[in-house]
């Protein structure tokens, strides 16, 4: 553990890296029309760049984590930011669709490993009772990206071109790389991991249940978030300007939820995750009622966003505890599960719309997924209680 002021600076450096990764992950969603026009493809084809990134994170997370573990936490985090810079630079310079796809796939290689090593590094800097809050600080970088980074990248892409948005993320990466190099302690040298033993920890019942909870939480969140703009336009009669304001307010809600989630997780991992998941289900159900007025829309979506990201710290800490022999790999796999939930949520929301049920059914479908996640968390808690009795 290091001195408190140095701890704060180190945690902020990790959070800055998370801010950059969150920006590059979500910014293309707002840039799809500009990207599609710029490389002469359809918007659905450009949308595959988002899907490819999520799949890249899912597949690469365990392999990149196991490979980089031999270099130690600090060098591994610096390496992930180097990959981030390279991928975004290639994306900014990409002359056509497939080279841009390659740039996005290279960028995706950094995410699971960064959050895996970052979570373990963050928890090593603070006392045990503050570890969930330290993880929340790291993830707060991601949620703040939705307030500033993503809208700024979208604006930059619309005003001067989508390539400059990717160039901006390269600058973010360089700043984060420098901050991590200066602020992080050297730490213990890395060791070549026992791959077979570490992978075996991922199939423990507690770990599988935690990953299932993360998939369902993320699925419940992204069922709504993927379609938040058309929901606001069709159900709340929102203008484009109001949609932009709401996206910023949702980002504020995500940041608030991250902070609250850290406090809840410091109190109780299972209890914190359960409370947050229940709140996510209830606020999702209330969205069709909340959008009847503008004030209701603001309150409803901010509360929903806060409930959603309040789930994150407890689920990340639970994953690291469920596979305590391989916490870095567990943390990175939880990020992979989050990205799988992203795809699941988008698919479920699309099915609800395609079935002709209307946009009002989308948040209800999200609530169902969150309710299933709550059931998994409850089952996980009961299972732990029975093990403790034995």
Image (tube, rainbow, N blue to C red):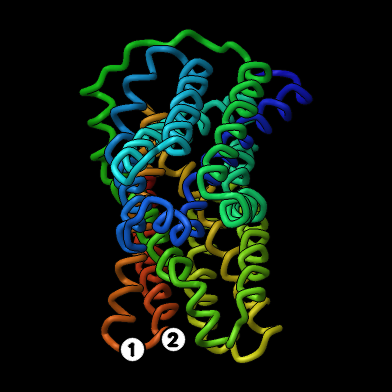
Of residues 178 and 102, the one drawn nearer to the viewer in this rendering:
102
Residue corresponding to mark 1: 357
Q: Is residue 126 left or right of residue 83?
A: right
Q: Decide: few, some or many residues near mark 1? Use Cα within 10 Å; few <14, some 14-19, many ≥20.
A: few
CA distance for labels 2 and 1: 7 Å
**Position in image of residue 5 (x %, y %):** 78, 25
> Measuring 58% from the left and 57% from the top, which residue is drawn there?
158
Residue furthest toward the right? Answer: 5
* CB atoms of marks 2 and 1 within 8 Å: yes
> Measuring 51% from the left and 59% from the top, which residue is drawn there?
30
The label on residue 360 is 2
The label on residue 71 is none
Residue furthest toward the top? Answer: 189
In this rendering, the answer to whether 304 lies above or below 289 is: above
**Position in image of residue 195 (x %, y %):** 25, 21
Evaluate whether residue 126 shows in this view. Answer: no
> Measuring 48% from the left and 23% from the top, which residue is drawn there?
82
């Amino acid at each position: 553990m290091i001195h408190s002021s140095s701890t704060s600076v180190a945690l902020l450096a990790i959070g800055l890296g998370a801010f950059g990764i969150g920006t590059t992950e979500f910014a293309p969603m707002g840039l799809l029309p500009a990207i599609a026009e710029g490389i002469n493809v359809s918007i659905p084809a450009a949308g595959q760049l988002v899907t490819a990134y999520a799949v890249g994170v899912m597949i690469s997370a365990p392999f990149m984590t196991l490979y980089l573990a031999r270099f130690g936490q600090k060098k591994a985090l610096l390496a992930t930011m180097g990959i981030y810079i390279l991928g975004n630079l290639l994306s900014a310079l990409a002359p056509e669709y497939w080279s841009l796809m390659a740039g996005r796939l290279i960028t995706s290689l950094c995410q699971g490993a960064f959050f895996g090593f970052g979570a373990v590094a963050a928890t090593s800097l603070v006392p045990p009772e503050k570890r969930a809050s330290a993880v929340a600080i790291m993830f707060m970088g991601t949620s703040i990206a939705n307030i500033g980074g993503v809208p700024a990248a979208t604006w930059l892409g619309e005003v001067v071109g989508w390539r400059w948005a990717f160039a901006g993320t390269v600058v973010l990466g360089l700043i984060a790389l420098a901050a991590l190099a200066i602020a992080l302690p050297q730490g213990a040298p890395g060791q070549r991991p026992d791959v077979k033993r570490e992978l075996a920890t991922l199939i423990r019942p507690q770990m599988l249940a935690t990953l299932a909870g993360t998939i369902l939480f993320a699925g419940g969140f992204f069922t709504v978030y993927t379609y938040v703009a058309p929901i606001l336009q069709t159900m709340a009669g929102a203008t484009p300007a109001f949609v932009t304001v709401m996206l910023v307010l949702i980002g504020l809600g995500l940041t608030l939820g991250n902070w609250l989630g850290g406090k809840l997780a410091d109190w109780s991992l299972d209890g914190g995750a359960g409370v947050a998941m229940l709140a996510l289900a209830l606020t999702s159900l209330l969205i069709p009622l909340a959008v009847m007025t503008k004030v209701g829309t603001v309150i409803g979506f901010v509360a929903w966003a806060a409930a959603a990201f309040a789930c994150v710290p407890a689920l990340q800490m639970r994953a690291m505890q469920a596979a305590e022999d391989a916490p870095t790999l567990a943390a990175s796999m939880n990020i992979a599960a989050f990205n799988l939930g992203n795809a699941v949520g988008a698919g479920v929301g699309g099915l609800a719309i395609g079935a002709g049920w209307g946009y009002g059914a989308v948040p209800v479908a999200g609530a169902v997924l969150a309710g299933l996640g709550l059931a998994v968390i409850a089952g996980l808690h009961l299972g732990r209680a029975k093990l403790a009795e034995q």
